[in-house]
Image (cartoon, coloured by chain):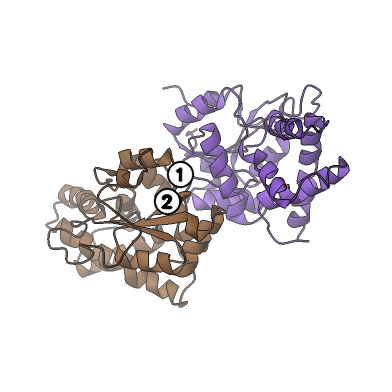
Chain colours: A brown, B purple
Amino acid sequence: MTTPKAYIFDVFGTLVDWRESVARECAHVFDTRGLDVDARSFADAWRGEYQPAMERIRSGGRGYIALDDLHLENLDRVLATFGLEAQFDNAERAALNRAWEKLDPWPDVVEGLNDLKEQAIIAPCSNGSIALMTRLAKYGGLPWDCILGAEIAKNYKPEREVYLSNCAALRLNPADVMMVAAHNDDLVAARDAGLRTAFIARPTEYGPGQSKDLEPNSDWDRLVETIGGLAVTR
Amino acid sequence: MTTPKAYIFDVFGTLVDWRESVARECAHVFDTRGLDVDARSFADAWRGEYQPAMERIRSGGRGYIALDDLHLENLDRVLATFGLEAQFDNAERAALNRAWEKLDPWPDVVEGLNDLKEQAIIAPCSNGSIALMTRLAKYGGLPWDCILGAEIAKNYKPEREVYLSNCAALRLNPADVMMVAAHNDDLVAARDAGLRTAFIARPTEYGPGQSKDLEPNSDWDRLVETIGGLAVTR
């Protein structure tokens, strides 16, 4: 069994703690304005609009639009849900939307990616845009070799073409590429497309009450506890 | 005058010494096989097929094909020109084609890019593919934030859409992006697309007899002698 020539990564939840980070950014803004809003509930509601927004594109009902723009549309909905629509003008919404560019990596991530980068190509395969992944990498120090993901395919995971287009962009066969994720359904789709798979549990991604993806639900090629665990010991 | 939010770079000639590097790789192969071929002439001839191959795509006569594949087609022609077509089978041609993945950076490049990366987004805007630029970065230690270039537009420089698509991928206005090149015609096209421009002379890119691009031929926004010279002193 040869080692993968490239590792591609889910990012939101797998590498970065979007919930606590978005809540922190929102709490800062709410506090500044004296608004009494539970920031974690707000972050959860914002993330709750994520799959439905992408599904309209995956189903063909809408052309590809970058996640940055979907996040902004979703923010409009969530502000309305929380009765805050009158509190934020367009410029303030755009500024708040940048919360998604300031997501803290889990503690094992930066060191693990640096180790792995010595052995193979590493790249995000996220639903985030090239711009968002680039800014997130600069914020968190993620040492990517290149930025792949949804924008390469102009479609969203778990559509098969996202995984295949990412392998093609590297000019590698899917069997030489390993998809790494904390979400079993991402790995199901990657395996169906011919990629190798690695699962890492992130049991607090959705907070202390998380009920999903606490464990691998299939015989993925690798199970690791840290990103550095993917690196081959020589 | 604000500083650019991103710097995008021509690569072949501007950042890496393709001629000496390709000649070195070819000389190694020729020597191993006892073939008496002038490796620099071979590298020049190979590079001589570069613009005509892209022009067939820019003119619309052919769909986008990655530069890796054009390089391989061009290699077939050059081997024939040198009477070497019987000496290399397909696997050997594919191996020789990888010479383009092992190009040495000019001495100022790695340190300069690392300095600049502290201040702004840095990315290649090359006619090389994502795969080729990724491998070149790993070979030479180029610390890109992301890989842009021709493949984002599925067309080749100096087509306007390459520059514009690269800015769009970063979600930046062209006026916030600076194109850096050792080739005046690349900068003409970038300026026409609304980008800022920086020129750096690489007077030995084509060897000691180089007659082109020895000097800037217009009032580019910046003239630098090293890549690190782009970094703002604070």
> Residue at position x 11%, y 57% from top?
A36
Q: Is residue B156 visible?
A: no
> Residue at position x 51%, y 52% from top?
B169
- Helix, strand, or loop for circle 2? strand
Q: Is residue A53 visible?
A: yes
The image shows residue A221 at horizontal and vertical percentages of 35, 59
Q: Nearer the viewer, residue A28 or A146?
A: A146
Is B228 on the left or on the right of B46, as rendered? left
The crowd level at tag 1 (other Cα within 10 Å; few <14, some 14-19, many 20+) is: some
Identified by mark 2, the residue type is: Tyr
Q: Quadrant of residue A200?
A: bottom left
> Residue at position x 60%, y 53% from top?
B151
Is A30 on the left or on the right of A92, as rendered? left
Identified by mark 1, the residue type is: Ala
Is B59 on the left or on the right of B10, as rendered? right
> Residue at position x 54%, y 44% from top?
B134
Instruction: Tell which subunit mark 2 falls on.
Output: A
Q: Which mark is residue A7?
A: 2
The image shows residue B60 at horizontal and vertical percentages of 75, 60
Identify the residue under disc 1.
Answer: A120
Please tell me which of labels 1 and 2 falls first in the chain.
2
Instruction: Tell which subunit mark 1 falls on.
Output: A
- Helix, strand, or loop for circle 1? loop
Query: What is the total number of numbered labels drawn onto the structure image?
Result: 2
Rendered view: A114 above or below A69: above
Q: Cβ–Cβ below 8 Å for labels 1 and 2?
A: yes
Q: Quadrant of the C terminus of chain B?
A: top left
The image shows residue A123 at horizontal and vertical percentages of 44, 49
- Disc 1 with disc 2 on a shared chain: yes
Q: Nearer the viewer, residue A230 or A165?
A: A230
Q: Nearer the viewer, residue B195 or B100?
A: B100
